[in-house]
Image: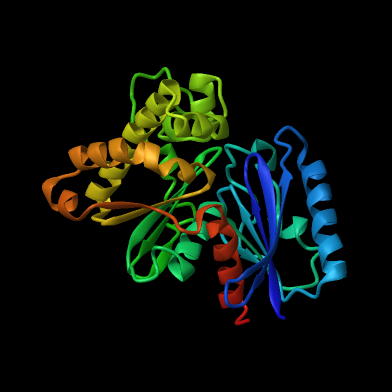
Amino acid sequence: METILAIDIGGTHQRFAEISLTGDILEKNTYQSHPHISSEEFFEILRKRISDRLKKTSFLGVAVALPVLMPVLMNEKVGNNSVQDAPNLPFLVGVDLAQSFSFLSVPWIVENDANCALLGEAWLGEGQKESSFCCLTLGTGIGSGLFLNGKLWKGVRGMASEMGHLKIDFLGNTPCTCGGQGCLEAFASATALQKKTGYTAQELYGMACRRESLALHAFEQMGESLGRGIGSVANLLNIDLFILAGRLSQAFEFFYPSCIRVAKESAMKGPRQHLKIVQSKLGDDAGLLGAAWLIKKKFQL
């Protein structure tokens, strides 16, 4: 069977998947990320993992979803190939990605992880029948992608839709990994939850399932912060649908009530009437599937 090797790299995990051209995930492996290593060590590990798989399977191409700000990259060099920003993997800033992936002999592509999740939703998820929507990936940080009039919107320099760094608090005492203050990510990500409670997001999810008040309150507050950001974007772009993906979206039932309430309170009357916030059915696989779709489309596989 003809397949694509898709890789989704987050702040805490690396996920590898063998994906068919119709979007079936045939095999998937997860590895722990090492956020405090050098870029050389990072790519040495990544190259070995990719090369080992290429020796065993003849993939049509390799698609990588990375939590960095950059222009879309393929085999050939396109403009400035250096990572502009990477709040959750800061050692990647300034790295020339075209050079780092030049060892590949098969078609390859690298794209922002949130944009990949958005494309996964447009291909096989909640966005299949939508011409415009926003997808937020909730994990170590908060990524987001915009699908406007049937196309991925990347902005003037390929760095659009950083909704995780939308300012929702202006008191100046909540730092974010981007170097700013008061960002949505500083209130509604897995990192934010752990800083606030001392528990990981996964631990809090288990506690919430047991109806423990600390976790229920933490997710309620997380939902309020998300709702504030979503309401503002709904006003700005008049988007009706917001899809929540990523590992933290598994706690949807616990943060959704406060999220939709505050989003509607924040939105103007027009956007409020049609506002929908839904949980991704693709979950943490949205980025893998979107990366696979992107290379399939770019190289007409």
Seen from this angle, which residue lies furthest front?
A: 210
Looking at the rendered image, the quarter that the N terminus falls into is bottom right
Residue nearest the viewer, comparing 231 with 214: 214
- The image shows residue 277 at horizontal and vertical percentages of 32, 50
Q: Quadrant of residue 80?
A: bottom right
Asked if residue 286 lies left or right of residue 235, the reply is right
Q: Quadrant of residue 4?
A: bottom right
On the question of residue 176 being in view, the answer is no
Task: From this view, report whether residue 192 is shown above or below residue 242.
Answer: above
Q: Residue at x 26, y 49 (%)?
A: 234
| Residue 62, placed above or below residue 165 | below
Apparent side of residue 165 relative to residue 37 in the rendered image (left or right) = left
Q: Position of residue 260 (x, y in %)?
A: 27, 42
Residue 276 in view: yes
Rendered residue at 43%/33% (across/down): 188
Answer above or below: position of 34 versus 99.
above
Callout count: 0
Residue in the image at 53% along x and 58% along y: 286
